């Protein structure tokens, strides 16, 4: 007799990582359920069209009853908690909402697993972040942040994520639940939201090339990030839940690059060597506190999980510009 397929519940199904992991889990034969919020979510139709195999369940991370209902419907072997207010700049403008969704939302998910009697049977992945480290001189390790590095979050988003990280670890320690936290450094790609700097740049580069706009407005250009490809990172999430024990793992590339370097490579894809005439700085995109530099050390994930990356930094920029050129040529909407 064949075994019944594993079931997974993904929060944040409409987001970048939610889409990548839905695809991966489907390829692996999972029954995939996705939590979707709002009475008329603008991304619902796109998810239904691209992933017809996903069973969408209505619910919001701030609504404990809805989360318990979702657990009962999906009866998940694995929960991927990817939903969050995830934009750092937005979190400064909406700190209370960010605390409720990105912080307390994690508690609501863990409690929904426990309250529905699934503490021993359901594994949980928590989407923790490199933003918890903060990039300040005093806590910056030379070889990159790892699982033992000090935290010093620099935004309401980072602080909310740190609460989520510790409550996840607390449920692991208190109730023996299988809860693994992936401390992921920035990961990007063709599904990245256009409110994030990499996609904002590649979208603008494509439009500039086609004569649809003449410049791009950005905030600070000197910060450095450890940028990888989202498709590689969701594979790491899945690997964490297949490991024998629940644990914390950093996923990163071990390289860091400035926004200026990203601009250089992106404009070079359309044959422009000097990007400066096309970029204007706008203080509206600067933050009250900035994370100067992020660099991660993925050694533990590589050794323990066998995690590998397929896309490097130049490859990432290339694939994003190529995708946005194709999208703009096809006349697809920019926002
Ligand atoms: P994303 O594209 O911004 O997606 C966020 C998702 O959260 C969306 O599906 C959004 O749904 C959902 N969401 C927001 N508020 C919600 C609420 N109240 N209830 C239920 N769902 C809600 O983020 P991502 O890049 O895929 O990242 C996935 C997760 O990893 C996030 O938790 C993020 O903080 C974390 N992370 C990301 C990175 C990165 O570089 N991408 C790095 C480290 C950690 P709507 O469509 O309804 O808004
Ligand atoms: O693309 P960003 O908005 O990403 P950020 O702040 O690093 O956060 C992302 O990565 C985190 C992991 O480290 C995730 F946890 C988080 O959910 C999110 O996915 O900004 C990157 C850098 C920042 O230094 C920002 O100040 O780009 C700078 N920047 C300069 N101009 C800009 C802009 N960022 C945005 N979004 N828009 C600009 O116009």
Image (tube, rainbow, N blue to C red):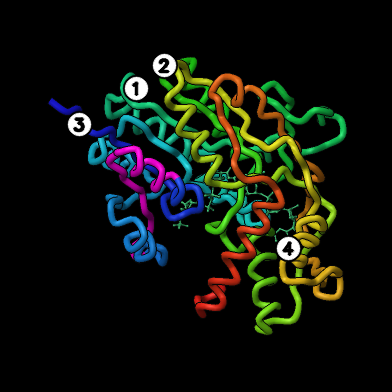
Q: Is residue 14 above or below residue 268?
A: above
For marks 4 and 2, give the one nearer the viewer: 4
- Residue 74 falls in which quadrant of the image? top left
Q: Which residues are magenta?
A: 21-40
* Left or right, residue 198 beside residue 335: right
Tell me the CA gap for discs 3 and 2.
Answer: 27 Å
The spot of residue 176 in percent (x, y) is 42, 15
The spot of residue 79 in percent (x, y) is 38, 35
Tell me which numbered mark, 3 or 2, is placed earlier along the sequence. 3
Tell me which numbered mark, 3 or 4, is placed earlier along the sequence. 3
The residue to which callout 3 is attached is 4
Between 107 and 240, the one nearer to me in the picture: 240
The spot of residue 46 in percent (x, y) is 38, 64
Tell me the CA gap for discs 4 and 1.
Answer: 46 Å
| Circles 3 and 4: CB atoms closer than 8 Å | no
Residue 50 visible to the viewer: yes
Between 331 and 45, the one nearer to me in the picture: 331
Residue 309 located within the stretch drawn in magenta = no
| Circles 2 and 1: CB atoms closer than 8 Å | yes
**What is the number of the mark on residue 175?**
2
Tell me which numbered mark, 1 or 3, is placed earlier along the sequence. 3
The residue to which callout 4 is attached is 266
SS assignment at label 4: helix
Residue 23 located within the stretch drawn in magenta = yes
SS assignment at label 1: loop
The residue to which callout 1 is attached is 119
Tell me the CA gap for discs 2 and 1.
Answer: 7 Å
SS assignment at label 3: loop
Tell me the CA gap for discs 1 and 3.
Answer: 21 Å
For marks 4 and 1, give the one nearer the viewer: 4
């Amino acid at each position: 007799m064949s075994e019944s397929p594993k079931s997974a519940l993904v929060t944040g199904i409409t987001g970048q990582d939610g889409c990548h992991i839905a695809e991966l889990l489907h390829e692996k034969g999972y029954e995939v359920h996705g939590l979707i919020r709002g009475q008329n979510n603008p991304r619902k139709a796109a998810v239904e069209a691209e992933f017809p195999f996903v069973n969408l369940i209505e619910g919001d991370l701030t609504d404990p009853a809805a989360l318990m209902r979702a657990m009962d419907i999906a009866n998940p072997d694995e929960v991927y908690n990817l939903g969050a207010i995830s934009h750092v700049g937005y979190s400064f403008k909406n700190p209370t909402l960010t605390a409720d969704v990105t912080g307390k939302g994690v508690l609501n998910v863990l409690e929904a697993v426990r309250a529905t009697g699934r503490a021993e049977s359901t594994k949980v992945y928590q989407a923790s972040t490199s933003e918890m480290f903060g990039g300040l001189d005093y806590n910056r390790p030379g070889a990159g942040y790892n699982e033992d590095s000090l935290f010093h979050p620099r935004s309401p988003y980072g602080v909310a994520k740190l609460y989520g990280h510790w409550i996840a670890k607390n449920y692991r320690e208190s109730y023996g639940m299988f809860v693994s936290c992936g401390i992921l450094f920035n990961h990007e790609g063709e599904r990245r939201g256009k409110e994030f700097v990499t996609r904002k740049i590649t979208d603008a580069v494509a439009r500039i090339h086609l004569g649809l706009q003449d410049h791009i407005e950005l905030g600070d250009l000197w910060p450095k990030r450890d940028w990888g490809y989202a498709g590689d990172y969701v594979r790491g999430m899945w690997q964490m839940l297949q490991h024998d024990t629940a644990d914390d793992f950093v996923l990163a590339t071990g390289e860091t690059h400035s926004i200026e370097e990203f601009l250089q490579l992106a404009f070079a894809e359309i044959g422009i060597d000097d990007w400066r005439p096309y970029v204007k700085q706008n203080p509206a995109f600067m933050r009250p506190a900035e994370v100067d530099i992020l660099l991660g050390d993925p050694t533990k994930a590589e050794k323990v999980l066998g995690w590998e990356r397929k896309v490097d930094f130049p490859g990432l920029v290339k694939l994003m510009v190529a995708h946005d050129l194709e999208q703009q040529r096809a006349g697809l909407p920019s926002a």
